[in-house]
Image (cartoon, rainbow, N blue to C red):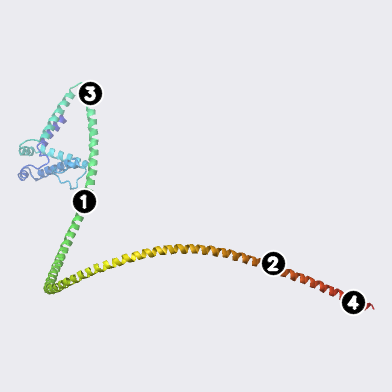
Amino acid sequence: MAILEETYSKLQLLSHVPPLRRADDYEKFVNEVGPEVAQVLDEQVTLEQQYRYVSTPQHEQVGIGFDGDQALPDFETLDDELRHSTRVVCRMLREAPAISERLQQAQSEGPSGSMRKFLSTFLELKSQTFQKLSTSVEEEKSKEDWFLEISAREEKASQQLRQLQKEIKAEKADRERNVSARNETIQKLRDELEYIKSATLEEEKTLEAETKASEEADNLAFTTKETTLQDELTRLTNELATKRKENKESEDQLRKKKVKYEGEVATWISKYDTDMEEKDREISALRLIYEEEHKELYRLEDYFSKLMAEREAALAEERKKAEERARQQAQMATLSKAATMVQKMWRGKVARRELEKKKSGKGGKGKKGKKA
């Protein structure tokens, strides 16, 4: 119980220290308590701000009163430093009650709501501890089991908290790397944008100068061309007036010729009609003659066709007779040739016989002479 009483007393002293901020009218406060005490309290405030920032989820760190881009120790180091600083502040307040009174006067509203709630909870815990000391062994065992269960839950929650804090730290490091990379990209883009702006400005100046020179040249060319075209327009207008006058005279002459030629054409048309009527009568007479002669031609063609047929028949008969005579003559020639050949063969045979007889007679006479 003495430990709890002492702890409660220390908590009451610490409740007078403004959380996460300096005391109001800080310069007056420094003069009253001294620079060393003010420095200790400033370190306490700084550690509390850092601890709050590190233990806050990353998406909730914006606007909590601390610059998150500064390099901070890890959670365990901050926890140890904050514990040590809190003990130093508590010891300082116990040794110098005037400082505690000055801090209490500076806080017109008293301790914060969370601190008052914590003190109330601590009083309740102290009361429960007193009851625990005055209860029996069985009740003590039951409450001890309940306390162990609560402690186990708290330990598990603490482990989860440490794991989450490690994840937060890793996430924060990753965020810092991403922020650094994005800052480099942004700076690079800014440099490129500045270069583009500079180049664009130079190009604008160059284009403006070129445009001005081109505009002046175009204006000069336009003025020159306008003068030339105006002169050309005047010349063409005069030529048009002259041409109109000439065309008017030519038109009058052509109209006179037209009237003359129209009269001649009417005369020629009348003559053409008369000639055509006469020619039509001649054609009709010739057509009658043609029809008569065509009938006569048809009759003569029929007559000569019959004559040609009869002549062809006679010629065919004559050809047959000539062929028969030629065939007979060929047969007679063949027979005559064969008879001649037979006669030649017979004569040759008779001549050979005569020759053999002559040879036989001469041989008999010769043998008889030798024998005599």
Instruction: Examine the image and state in which quarter residue 35 appears.
Output: top left
Amino acid type, mark 2 = Leu
Secondary structure beneath dot 3 equals helix
Residue ID for mark 2: 335
- Give the x, y percent position of residue 26: 6, 44
Near-viewer residue (73 or 344) = 344
Amino acid type, mark 3 = Ser
Residue ID for mark 1: 182
Residue ID for mark 4: 365
Secondary structure beneath dot 1 equals helix
Gap between marks 2 and 1 measured at Cα? 138 Å
Residue density around tag 4, few if under 14, some if 14–19, many if 20 or more, within 10 Å: few
Gap between marks 4 and 3 measured at Cα? 198 Å
Amino acid type, mark 4 = Lys
Residue density around tag 3, few if under 14, some if 14–19, many if 20 or more, within 10 Å: few
First in residue order: circle 1 vs circle 4: 1
Secondary structure beneath dot 2 equals helix
Depth check, mark 4 against mark 2: the one in front is 2
Residue ID for mark 3: 142
Near-viewer residue (295 or 143) = 295
Work out which residue is located at the far right of the displayed protein and give it. 372
First in residue order: circle 4 vs circle 3: 3
Above or below 312: residue 79 = above
